[in-house]
Image (spheres, rainbow, N blue to C red):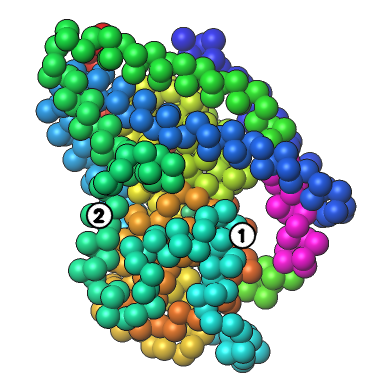
Amino acid sequence: MSEAHHQPHLTKWIILAIVLAIVAAMFAPTFAMSFAIGGEIFLRVLKMIVVPLVVASVMTGILGMGDVRKLGKPGLYTVIYYLATTLLAVIVGLVVVNIVRPGLSMGEEAKAGVAESKRPNEVLFEHLAAETGLSDDAIAKTFGDSDYVERKDRSMGRIFRNLILMLFTDNLFESAVGTQLLPLIVFSIAFAGLLTTMGDGVSTLKSFILEANNALMAFILLIMRVAPLGIFCLVAGRFGQANANGQFLAELSKTGWYSASVLIGLGVHSFITLPAILYFFTKRNPYRFMVQMGQALLTAFSTASSSATLPLTMEAAVDEAGISRQSVDFVLPLGATINMDGTALYEAVAAIFIAQVVGADLSFAQQVTVAITATLAAIGAAGIPEAGLVTMVIVLTAVGLPVEYITIILSVDWLLDRFRTTVNVFGDACGAAIVEKSMPAAEPVG
Ligand code: ASP
């Protein structure tokens, strides 16, 4: 089956599309911006399919196991993998930011700029509402409440409580409408688990789910045919806009050492840490694996959203990297929502950077608090553009840093977001390859 689906030239076309789009954005920003609508259409089509895909694929993954009790071992490994790699990413980030010390080269000028800017939440909300297309309310909800600046509400207990509550919904349809994937995944696991115990009485329902999943995968292949075009429009539109607003090179150089720290950290994690882990557990060539996942990684860079990339991640993992459908169905939808190595690393770097800028000397214990809250903040971040910036408030308030300093890093976030999203998706893909080793043999279903 994988032979028929193999699309060897797709990655090359996508690379070409990104290069052309950046060139267009550099030299003719206004022209480039006119492609934004094409990018928006592509994004909508990807997002459109995410909810049905997550439900159908998670259910198929569970049905394929034949018995929900067999979930124990792979489930445990998946959670351990998510947590361990996220923590490792945070540690890499902390080491890099403590060596480079980007905050020390940041002048008084930047600090003055923060003081006179608007209240941080207004700035953040306007910016994030524009970037993510969510309402202010929905953004505030990411924190679990709208009182998020209140320090007393940011205790660890509260953060944990909100994270646990994120798993459950009182209305499945509302979750589907809001693309809140976690409660849908929890429901799908429980529901499909139940189906595995009901025998022949529900065989039609089971085949319906399997067929729906197959059909959705076929639909993704269709979307992939236009992926290079969609990606060209997305990148041309966004980079063109950034260039037209003078947001590009000037901003990048203003926060140069900070951006460099984030990029160095992400580089270490994706070219050294994750490859080492992948090789250790699967003996796969990690760099070959990276190339196989190329279309998904480039789409992650172009969309800045792990959720929107999910369809292509799943397709590449099965058809290019040859990971079993069962592992892919089980590990990737969950990973796209909660496993965010790049985001965690970025949150840690940004928090310490801000501490350096304000001249706060963080103790070892406070750095540990940063590490833990950065991990939680990354788990809590949705797989949408710049969600990590929203949940960063959690990290800053946990160690008593001023939230308004987020405005310093606001202007480059759209760009750094792309890199961390790419790392998020690569982390998920490695997870699927590793957990595959612990999957029980697939059972015939239907
Ligand atoms: N955009 C990231 C993602 O979708 C989340 C973030 O770090 O903002 O994975």
Q: Position of residue 293 (x, y in %)?
A: 51, 33
Picture quarter containing residue 189?
A: top left
Residue designated by label 1: 130
SS at badge 2: helix
Identified at 35% across, 57% down, the residue is 380
Q: Which residue is mark 2?
A: 165
Position of residue 42 relative to residue 356, above or below, is above
Give the image location of residue 104, x and y in percent.
Answer: 54, 85
Verify whether residue 240 appears in magenta.
yes
Give the left or right position of residue 158, taking residue 414 as reference: left
Assess mark 1: CB under 8 A from ligand 1? no
Please name whichever residue, 54 or 432, is drawn nearer the observer in this view of the structure.
Answer: 54
Residue 304 falls within the magenta-colored stretch: no
Instruction: Tell me which label, 2 or 1, sits earlier in the chain.
Output: 1
Residue 315 spot, x, y in % from top left = 48, 26
CB of mark 2 within 8 Å of CB of mark 1? Answer: no
- At 86% from the left and 49% from the top, the residue drawn is 31
Q: Quadrant of residue 154?
A: bottom left
Principal secondary structure, stretch drawn in magenta = helix
In the rendered structure, the answer to whether residue 441 lies left or right of residue 325 reads: left
In the depicted structure, whether residue 270 falls above or below residue 411: above
Label disc, if present, on residue 138 of the rendered structure: none
Packing grade of label 2 (10 A; few <14, some 14-19, many >=20) is few
Q: How many neighbours does mark 1 have within 10 angstroms: few (below 14), some (14-19), or many (20 or more)? A: few
Query: Which residue range is magenta in the image?
Result: 231-249
SS at mark 1 in the image: helix
Q: As drawn, is 298 to the left or to the right of 337? A: right
Which residue appears at 59% of the width and 38% of the height?
44
Return the residue nearer the eye: 81 or 157.
157
